[in-house]
Amino acid sequence: MVDGMLGGVNVSRDSDAPAQGSTQEGTVWAGADGYRVYGGIKSIDIEDPDHVQLHVEKISDPGPGEDCQVTVRLESVDFISGQGAGEGALELTIESDIHGEQSVTRSTRLPTGSSQNIAESIESFEVPQGRSLTKQLTTKVTEREVGSDWFTGNDDYGESTTDIVMQCGAPKTVSEEVTISSDRGNEGKVRVNYTIGDLSR
């Protein structure tokens, strides 16, 4: 979501119309809301095209003094340790929250010793060339107990918060290890990986 000038139109952020994964829903009562969509785009579906301006252009490398667009993307999750062989795969809900900005929530099944790709963009930021922008990122992980495993206990939970530093340049990977508490004393642990950078490269 953009705050400022976009395509010659003054747009602003609207906390009542956040992006949910690859879908944007909301109502504009006054003024205009603006969004940038980029990367390997196959198609864009617009429900009410008469009320939307769509601009298509190639994103080039920023020159000196120009801004670049840095995206934070929830990339994947890795199994580190489980909570007992009898419980099978981890049924996870992962919420990634950039404080004061957007968040995404995804559910996935993570068998013992495996990794799962997610590739869900959370938010994009304009960063001046040669400078940096720091935000706090909290990763919240819930291990859900499915109906057939009700006897194994209640849902288990863990979270971790870190500072992420965004700069122009090649994307980088930031990982958070999250320990999942357990009412049975056998904690689990997963690694949640993020890609941060100009993802148009």
Image (tube, rainbow, N blue to C red):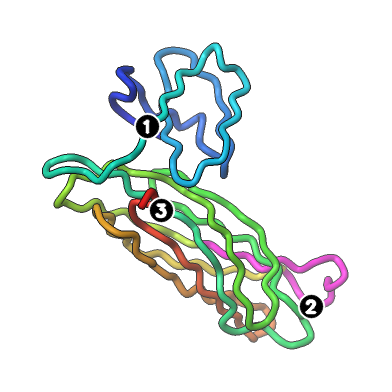
Image point (39%, 52%), residue name: 199
| Residue type indicated by callout 1 | Glu
Nearest to viewer (mark 3 / mark 1):
1
Left or right: where does residue 70 sit relative to residue 41?
A: left
Q: Are marks 3 and 2 in contact (CB under 8 Å)?
A: no
Q: Which residue is mark 1?
A: 57
> Residue 5's spot in the image, x, y percent?
29, 24
Q: Is residue 54 magenta?
A: no
**Which label's residue is closer to the chain start, 3 or 2?**
3
**Which label's residue is closer to the chain start, 3 or 1?**
1
> Vertically, is 152 above or below 7?
below
Estimate the spatial distance between the alpha carbons at disc 3 and disc 2, rounded to whole Å: 35 Å
Estimate the spatial distance between the alpha carbons at disc 3 and disc 1, rounded to whole Å: 21 Å
> Residue 113's spot in the image, x, y percent?
63, 83
Q: Which residue is mark 3?
A: 72
Label 3 crowd (10 A; few <14 / some 14-19 / many >=20): many
Q: Residue 152 bears which disc, if any?
A: 2
Judging depth in this view, the residue of 92 and 170 nearest the camera is 170
Rendering quarter of residue 69: top left
Q: Is residue 143 magenta?
A: yes
Label 2 crowd (10 A; few <14 / some 14-19 / many >=20): some
Nearest to viewer (mark 2 / mark 1):
1
> Vertically, is 50 above or below 82?
above
| Residue type indicated by callout 2 | Thr
Judging depth in this view, the residue of 168 and 85 nearest the camera is 168
Image point (70%, 77%), residue name: 111
Q: Are marks 2 and 1 in contact (CB under 8 Å)?
A: no
Judging depth in this view, the residue of 105 and 120 nearest the camera is 120
Q: Residue 112 bears which disc, if any?
A: none
> Vertically, is 67 above or below 152?
above
Label 1 crowd (10 A; few <14 / some 14-19 / many >=20): few
Magenta range is 140-154
